[in-house]
Image (spheres, rainbow, N blue to C red):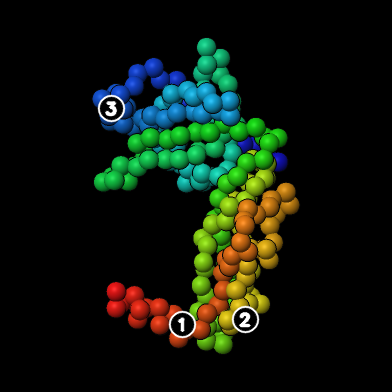
Amino acid sequence: MAELMTLSARPRAEKGKGTCRRMLSKNLVPGVYYNQKGQNIPVVVDLLPLTKLHRKLGSSRVFHLQIDLDGKAESLPSLMWSMQYDPLKSTPIHVDFYGVDLEREIKVDVKVVVEGKAKGIIMGGLLEVFRDSLEVICKPLDVPEKIVIDVTDLELGVNLHISEIKLPSGVRAVYDDNYAVVGVIAQEVEEDKTAETAKK
């Protein structure tokens, strides 16, 4: 198992919009750490390490959030659950961390990556990706970076459904309906959809 990445955070006592603005002006991002017992700890993290970690791990992969609590540094297995951005600068202005138990399963969204050239494309069809992420359940350390779907054998007019997607060991999909994830559609269908949209 690869060593988990670490992000350092500091508890913050001050709250309010004015305090948050001052933090952001110093390249600090306010946030909150939530654990599974319902407790929360207001924290602040440095902007650059935060953005680098989010770029690498996204919101579904676990890391160690290191917080100084009562003079003692604690490493807490966490997810970067949600991030709020400045609408003009596109920089983080608030982040929520969620503490996880490495032995308990969690529910997360994992991005879909399509590989291969479908047989149906060679026959003149268009590849349509209906879901760009899949909701799965697994232990935090089993969360895959991505779910790769090989579409090489996909024929024209055929969809690949969630029940047919091969997932890594220890990972299972969450669904009630056996929905289509990716498929090859006829170009006329896509043209009809485009024309219908143009009429609206």
Residue 39 badge = none
- Relative to residue 129, is residue 64 depicted above or below? above
Residue at mark 3 to residue at mark 1: CA–CA distance? 50 Å
Q: Residue at x 62, y 56 (%)?
A: 175
Q: Residue at x 57, y 46 (%)?
A: 108
Q: Amino acid at mark 1?
A: Val
Q: Which of these two is toward me, 6 or 96?
A: 96
- Relative to residue 132, is residue 68 depicted above or below? above
Expressed as whole percent of the image width and height from the top left, the position of residue 157 reads 58, 81
Q: Amino acid at mark 2?
A: Glu
Q: Which numbered disc flags the more N-terminal residue, 3 or 1?
A: 3
Q: Are marks 2 and 3 in contact (CB under 8 Å)?
A: no
Q: Quadrant of the image for the N terminus?
A: top right
Q: Quadrant of the image for the C terminus?
A: bottom left
- Relative to residue 182, is residue 21 depicted above or below? above
Q: Residue at x 42, y 40 (%)?
A: 83
Where is mark 3, residue-wise? 17
Query: Is residue 135 visible in this depiction of the protein?
Result: yes
Where is mark 2, residue-wise? 155
For the residues carrying marks 3 and 1, which lies nearer the camera in this image?
Answer: 1
Where is mark 1, residue-wise? 189
Q: Which of these two is toward me, 107 or 155?
A: 107
Q: Which of these two is toward me, 5 or 109?
A: 109
